Amino acid sequence: MNYDIKDINLAPNGALRAEWAEREMPVLRDIKTRFKQEKPLKGIKISGCLHITAETANLAHTLKDGGADLSLCASNPLSTQDDIAAHLVASGIPIFAIKGEDPDTYYRHIEAVVNHGPNITVDDGADVVALLHSEKQDLIKNVIGGMEETTTGVIRLKALHNQGKLRYPIIAVNDSDTKHMFDNRYGTGQSSLDGIIRATNILITGKTIVTIGYGWCGKGFASRAKGMGAHTVVCEVDPVRALEAVMDGHTVLEMNDASKVGDIFLTVTGGINAIDKSHFRNMKDGAIVANSGHFNVEINIDALKKMSESKRKVRPYVEEHTLENGKKIFLLGEGRLINLTAAEGHPPSVMDMSFANQALAGEYIVANYKNMEPGVHILPNEIDSEIARLKLHAMGMTFDELTEEQETYLNSWEIGT
């Protein structure tokens, strides 16, 4: 299989960056050591569509050391780190990813990894699964299972399953506590702010920042923006989450009202048109708009383009749109994941747990796929707990365990005296 990367000469720098990330990924490192000895993935073909970053490189090495025959493409046209792609190719892993690739190239790359003939799929947004269930159905017979990394992907997979069309079992790695509670909250929270700051060099303190969507990602972002001195506003359609945002100290407004007061807007809904034409009309001159949801459809970019008399690139990843009334709106990173477009994505410390889930999910599928029905599955709680235990151990932390007496009491129906 041929690979498709920008420049193989970037490999040495990519190797150094992957090594640096590994220092903060002790759980995955432990799994990699065991995998290298036990080879639980020996002979298994894995096709993955993930963000090609330094952290992903360490997952790729872990899967390969576990015996997997691995092929990867990018899950976002702007998230690839070209030096990491080159490093992985130099390590013997076929990569189909170039930062800034056009849509045709992006989908051609997904097709390339699907043509690898996978036994296991690894997705960040369910694009590999979608292609297998549409144009490449002849290859599904080889697939024993898959893993999905994102909320958006899990939503797509559940919809496919509810229609009776999902043809193999997929573990929703995204729904493991050691993934969504940490990766989404702490990872997205920090890295999205990092991306906005890198793209704009704007001061966060004193700005009104509107977070659209208050799931785990929204909670993390709004919390960190507030911690940096921003006035924080949350927009939500779920009344329970909206109430939670109020109790967390944020102002909750309808988007029609929030669009009039915000300086910076970030979408993290997993849906479509969270920022729409009417909202652009309401915005202040100089409003900054960004997205950290998986797909750029959260912002109605087509509407913004039609409303604009002119547009120009004023900084890397910053596009200035001038509306008919002269008002300017700044779109960051083409509306794609700002934390991966303008920054480096999640810190390796949180991806350590996310990718530990991916690696152990692959091992679990190989051992249990014969007893798994097509559908969306959750990684067993004992694996989730083991990842947390390993992470605490790596951090030098200890925690209590129940005594036999306490465990007996908690499992009894009798009321103690």
Image (cartoon, grey):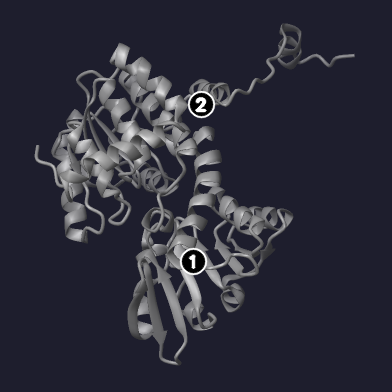
Q: Which residue is painted at 51% across and 83% down in the image?
A: 285
Q: Which residue is painted at 38% across and 46% down in the image?
A: 153
Task: Tell me where residue 55 appears, x and y as whole percent.
Answer: 38, 38
**In front here: 154 or 384?**
384
Numbered disc in front, either 1 or 2: 1
Residue 73 visible (yes or no) = no
Q: Is residue 284 above or below residue 380?
A: below
Q: Residues within 10 Å of mark 2 (few under 14, many from 20)?
A: many
Task: Tell me where residue 286 appears, x and y as whole percent.
Answer: 50, 79
Q: Residue furthest left?
A: 2
CA–CA distance in space, label 1 to label 2:
38 Å
Q: Which residue is painted at 43% across and 67% down in the image?
A: 273
Task: Tell me where residue 337 appears, x and y as whole percent.
Answer: 40, 57
What mark, if any, has residue 298 been given in the picture?
none
Q: Which residue is mark 1?
A: 201
Q: Residue furthest right?
A: 417
Query: Tag 1, which secondary structure?
Result: loop
**In front here: 144 or 39?**
39
Q: Is residue 286 above or below residue 139?
A: below
**In front here: 259 or 133?**
259
Task: Tell me where residue 192 appears, x and y as whole percent.
Answer: 49, 55
Q: Which residue is mark 2?
A: 384
Name the amino acid type tagged 2.
Answer: Asp
Q: Is residue 300 above or below residue 408?
A: below
Name the amino acid type tagged 1.
Answer: Asn
**In front here: 273 or 310?**
310
Q: Residues within 10 Å of mark 1 (few under 14, many from 20)?
A: few
Query: Tag 2, which secondary structure?
Result: helix
Q: Earlier in the sequence, mark 1 or mark 2?
A: 1
Residue 51 visible (yes or no) = yes
